[in-house]
């Protein structure tokens, strides 16, 4: 979803800041590598080469620990491909973004008979927010850090974002912050603290929208070949389709504000059918906001 794109954007545009955070070192020359690893195309979230140290740093951002294949196996596959391609040391870090009680977020190695592979794990909800609050490039991650008063933390983040003077950096960091905050906070609170129009003007937001639109078109073509249309949508009745989607959303998120409901009401029958499938993968109400923005006429 959008969260991977946000983290990739931050890694590609502020690599030195993330290297300082994740590895505790200062670097001056960094090359951001392509994330496709041949021979079979597999993708890692962020691959960064430290030219001065002749070392690969791989950062894998995970919303939740569930993964197919398992995350430990994926990390081993990444390591083998990277070592084979670049023939230099590889340091891997997995960053879990969203709080969970799953024991999988405490796993930092693959153990299979005579095979062992280790990597480092960071759980954002255990991190001290002060590091992120002190660096504009890391402010989006501050929303997910440890706090006994999460609302107060979000207010602090909003205040720090507001202090960014450079217009383009302000726009994009604000957008990234709002979207990552959606993993933890109610959309209404985020809207109260951050200007929504700023997010819509940002480069990263537009990239997410464009990607979502392309995926939506492909999904729409695929759906046209599938049998078993949902009840209501099968008859082509927009009202019934709208009712089904709203019930699904309320059951998943408890409530949907009037503005979002109005946006859903404007969707065509085909779009409602697409949304009824897409919402199964939504993790927060922010995913709905992003999806609707990408499907506006």
Image (tube, rainbow, N blue to C red):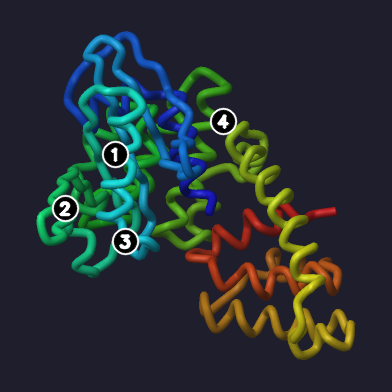
Look at 28% across and 39% down and name the residue there: 79
Nearer-N-terminus badge (3/2): 3
**Nearest to the observer: residue 154 or residue 283:** 283
Q: Residues within 10 Å of mark 1 (few under 14, many from 20)?
A: few
**Which labelled disc corresponds to residue 109?**
2
Kind of element beneath mark 2: strand
Look at 60% across and 70% down and name the residue there: 279
- In the drawing, does residue 278 fall left or right of residue 69? right
**Nearest to the observer: residue 144 or residue 26:** 26
Q: Residue furthest right?
A: 236
Q: Position of residue 17 (x, y in %)?
A: 32, 24
The quarter of the displayed image where residue 195 is located: top right
Q: Position of residue 292 (x, y in %)?
A: 70, 58
Q: Is residue 177 visible?
A: no
Instruction: Provide the residue designation for mark 4.
Output: 171
Judged by depth in the image, the label closer to the viewer, 1 or 3, is 1
The quarter of the displayed image where residue 157 is located: top left
Q: Residue furthest left?
A: 114
**Which labelled disc corresponds to residue 70?**
3
Look at 19% across and 44% down and name the residue there: 119
Q: Residues within 10 Å of mark 3 (few under 14, many from 20)?
A: few
* CB within 8 Å, label 1 to label 3: no
The quarter of the displayed image where residue 261 is located: bottom right
Instruction: Provide the residue designation for mark 1.
Output: 80
Q: CA distance from mark 3 to mark 2?
A: 11 Å
Q: CA distance from mark 2 to mark 4?
A: 38 Å
**Nearest to the observer: residue 174 or residue 102:** 102
Q: CA distance from mark 4 to mark 3?
A: 36 Å
Nearer-N-terminus badge (1/2): 1
């Amino acid at each position: 979803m959008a969260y991977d794109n946000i983290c990739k954007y931050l890694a590609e545009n502020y690599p030195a800041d993330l290297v300082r955070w994740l590895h505790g070192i200062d670097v001056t020359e960094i090359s951001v590598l392509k994330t496709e690893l041949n021979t079979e195309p597999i993708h890692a979230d962020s691959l960064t080469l430290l030219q001065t140290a002749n070392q690969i740093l791989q950062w894998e951002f995970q919303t939740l620990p569930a993964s197919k294949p398992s995350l430990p196996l994926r990390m081993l596959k990444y390591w083998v491909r990277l070592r084979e391609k670049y023939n230099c040391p590889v340091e891997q870090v997995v960053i879990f973004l969203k709080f969970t009680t799953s024991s999988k977020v405490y796993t930092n190695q693959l153990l299979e008979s005579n095979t062992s592979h280790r990597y480092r794990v960071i759980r954002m909800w255990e991190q001290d927010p002060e590091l992120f609050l002190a660096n504009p490039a890391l402010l989006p991650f501050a929303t997910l850090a440890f706090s006994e008063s999460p609302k107060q933390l979000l207010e602090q983040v909003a205040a720090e974002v507001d202090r960014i003077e450079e217009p383009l950096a302000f726009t994009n960091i604000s957008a990234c912050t709002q979207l990552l905050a959606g993993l933890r906070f109610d959309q209404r609170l985020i809207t109260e603290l951050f200007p929504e129009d700023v997010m819509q003007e940002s480069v990263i937001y537009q990239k997410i929208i464009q990607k979502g639109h392309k995926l939506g078109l492909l999904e729409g073509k695929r759906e046209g070949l599938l049998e078993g249309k949902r009840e209501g949508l099968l008859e082509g009745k927009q009202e019934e389709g709208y009712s089904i989607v709203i019930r699904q959303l309320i059951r998943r998120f408890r409530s949907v504000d009037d503005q979002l409901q109005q946006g859903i009401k404007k969707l065509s029958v085909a779009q409602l059918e697409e949304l009824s499938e897409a919402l199964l993968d939504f993790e927060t109400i922010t995913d709905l906001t992003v999806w609707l923005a990408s499907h506006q006429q």
